[in-house]
Image (cartoon, coloured by chain):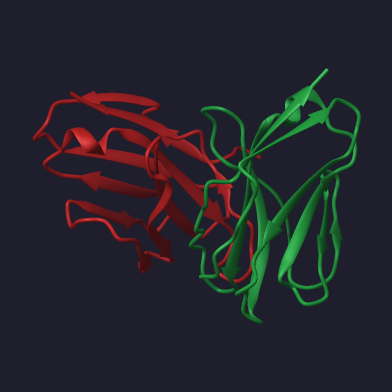
Chain colours: A green, B red
């Protein structure tokens, strides 16, 4: 599984966009980029995933660079409830194994 | 639609004992995976089951085992518990094996004393 590199922590003001970067320079052609988040003491929550095209859903947008070596998760209007650890994961299609790194601890402040 | 249900939510066991944790996936989901989360090691993959077959196993000792039943419910067992087995054990279910998102339960917090 490709390794990912994320900043340890980030801050964001409530109402502003939160842009969380992820580097995955060794990603293979059949590996997808997944984002999960974990709010304290809860199970991880799926946010979004993509292969090479940008994706958007009701929670967030995922921007993947053309060379697929990095991506950015965008929370367009962060709220206090978005405070969590965000994990960027690359995963081979066909297997459910998720390799979690240390993630980015996002703190949204008023 | 009910989410992933894990039972029990909290458990205290003594060193040397064994424990069985249960996971009921979302209705219709056929894949179940297990993870261990500790402050020191983070989230680590234990095993993955699809249609009652173990498809993948993480780097854990043989004391950790699991199984999946025909109704997709899954159990994991840890024998000869050690203090280091204290952790949050998380179960995730997915509809299929191909590129489907996993939905996690709230976990079982196991404390070994």
Q: Nearer the viewer, residue B62 or B26?
A: B62
Residue B71's spot in the image, x, y percent?
43, 54
Residue A20 to residue A106: above or below: below
The residue located at (29%, 25%) in the rendering is B11
The extreme left residue here reads B16
Residue B95 to residue B7: above or below: below
Q: In this view, does A47 lie to the left or right of A40?
A: right
Residue B89's spot in the image, x, y percent?
38, 39
Q: Is residue B32 left or right of residue A66?
A: left
Residue A61 shows in the view:
yes
Residue B49's spot in the image, x, y percent?
40, 62
Residue B24 to residue B96: above or below: above
The residue located at (85%, 27%) in the rendering is A13
- Name the image quarter holding residue A26: bottom right
Residue B94's spot in the image, x, y percent?
57, 57
Q: Nearer the viewer, residue B109 or A8?
A: A8
The extreme top residue here reads A110
> How many discs mark residues in the rendered view?
0
- Name the image quarter holding residue A68: bottom right
Residue A88 to residue A14: above or below: below
The extreme bottom residue here reads A29
The residue located at (30%, 60%) in the rendering is B59
Quadrant housing the C terminus of chain A: top right
Residue B72 shows in the view:
no
């Amino acid at each position: 599984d490709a390794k990912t590199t994320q900043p340890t922590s980030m801050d964001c003001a409530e109402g502003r966009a939160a842009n969380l970067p992820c580097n995955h320079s060794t990603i293979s052609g059949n590996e997808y980029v997944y984002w999960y988040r974990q709010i304290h003491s809860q199970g991880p929550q799926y946010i979004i995933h993509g292969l090479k095209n940008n994706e958007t859903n009701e929670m967030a947008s995922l921007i993947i660079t053309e060379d697929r070596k990095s991506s950015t998760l965008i929370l367009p209007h962060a709220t206090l409830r978005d405070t969590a650890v965000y994990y960027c994961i690359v995963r081979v299609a066909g297997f459910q194994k998720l390799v979690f790194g240390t993630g980015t601890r996002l703190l949204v402040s008023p | 639609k009910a989410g992933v249900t894990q039972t029990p939510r909290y458990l205290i066991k003594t060193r040397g004992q064994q424990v069985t944790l249960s996971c009921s996936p979302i209705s219709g989901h056929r894949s179940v995976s297990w993870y261990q989360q500790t402050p020191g090691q983070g989230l680590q993959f234990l095993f993955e089951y699809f249609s009652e077959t173990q498809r993948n196993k993480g780097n854990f000792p043989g004391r950790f085992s699991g199984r999946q039943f025909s109704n997709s419910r899954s159990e994991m067992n840890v024998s000869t518990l050690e203090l280091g087995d204290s952790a949050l054990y998380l179960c995730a279910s997915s509809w299929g094996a191909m590129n489907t998102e996993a939905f996690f339960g709230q976990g079982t917090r196991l404390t070994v004393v």
